[in-house]
Amino acid sequence: MSTAPDTQQPAPRTGTPPTLARTGAGAGHIAVALAHWAGGHTIGPEEITRRIVKARAEAHAAAVAEHARQARAAHKRGRRLRQRAELNGGLVPADQTALVAADQEAQRHDAAISALAEFTAPVLDPGQIRHRRHRTAAVRCLVLTLPPTAVVAGSWMWSGSVFLFSVVGAVGACLARGDRPFELTVRPVPAELIAATPHVLADAPAEVVPKPVAVDAGAWREELRLYVEQLVALADLDGRTGVHVADILVALQRDGRFIGATTKTFPSTLRDAGVPTDVVKLKSAVPPSALGVRYDRLAAALGHQPRLPAHLVPDITADDEAGPGEYPSPAPRAAAG
């Protein structure tokens, strides 16, 4: 007696359907490619370095041109004031201040042009390159948000079919891509950028420790008070009650300080440094009455009488012609009032 062979039932199929697997793989590859582009990784360190150097070179050229323009203007003001002095036989204190300021400004801009000289490619810190890449990534991420925003807005304002067609198109793109990953590469540096930055090396710059930046601790106030104290003390030896603000400013600007100040703005600078200002009457000055620093007012503000340093104190023992109780007149540092 024969029996029929046992028939085996087919095993159930397991796993993800091929179409769905292909769509998922394509979506993953597209997402990785978008993340690579949005993160700014398509731009290499060399291109970022060259773009930073190019921007600084353009800023350097603009700074040189601006200093040259201001130097020409300052030289022109100085020539005009000297011509006025020749025609009028001199200048009033305000014009003297303007002339000194013009000369100092012209020298400052000429020195700035000489200091700038030719542009040299700087050594960049890796943090600067990373910061530039983050800026590029922020802009690209913003660009990536535009298509979904447009789809949502179109679906809300126009028709829901916009969202349907967008989803179908995205799924179709993922299905078409399948299991074929993108080649994540860095784009080559543009030829025109290489030509504009010939001194930049191809390798990424090494890390440089930044130098600390000096902070102004207000030492200029103490220096200004000491300077004014010496001028007022010299004026007292000459028998004057004080010094005009215009004479103080001219003396300072001869030393290359407070070039941008004027007789209208400098009194507030003196008061900011703790130097009181008041109307000072001097018979030998033109005009005789003007804003200045009085000996008594300055002594009250300092808490002691204005003093001179040892090298400026007059030596009465070396003056044979000086009588009893008389002091020789020292050469003043500032223009006498």
Image: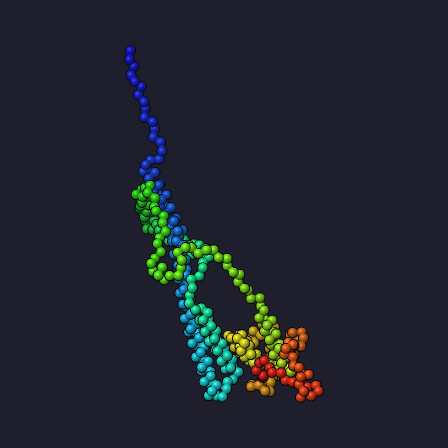
Residue 269 position within the rendered picture, expressed as x and y whole percent measured from the top left: 56, 73
Residue placed at 41% from the left, 55% from the top?
A: 203
Residue placed at 38% from the left, 49% from the top?
A: 36
Which quadrant of the figure has residue 235? bottom right
The answer to whether residue 66 is left or right of residue 335 is left
Q: According to the image, what is the colour scheme of the structure?
A: rainbow
Residue 294 in view, yes or no:
no
Residue placed at 57% from the left, 70% from the top?
A: 220
Query: Where, quadrant-wise, is the C terminus in this rendering?
Result: bottom right
- Furthest residue to the right? 324
Residue 93 position within the rendered picture, expressed as x and y whole percent measured from the top left: 53, 83
- Furthest residue to the top? 1
Residue 128 position within the rendered picture, expressed as x and y whole percent measured from the top left: 45, 57
Q: Is the residue 80 above or below the residue 42 in the image?
A: below
Residue 303 in view, yes or no:
yes
The answer to whether residue 97 is left or right of residue 159 is right
Residue placed at 50% from the left, 85% from the top?
A: 91
Query: Where, quadrant-wise, is the N terminus in this rendering?
Result: top left
State how many labels appear: 0
Residue 314 position within the rendered picture, expressed as x and y whole percent measured from the top left: 65, 81
Given residues 159 and 110, the one toward you in this image is 110
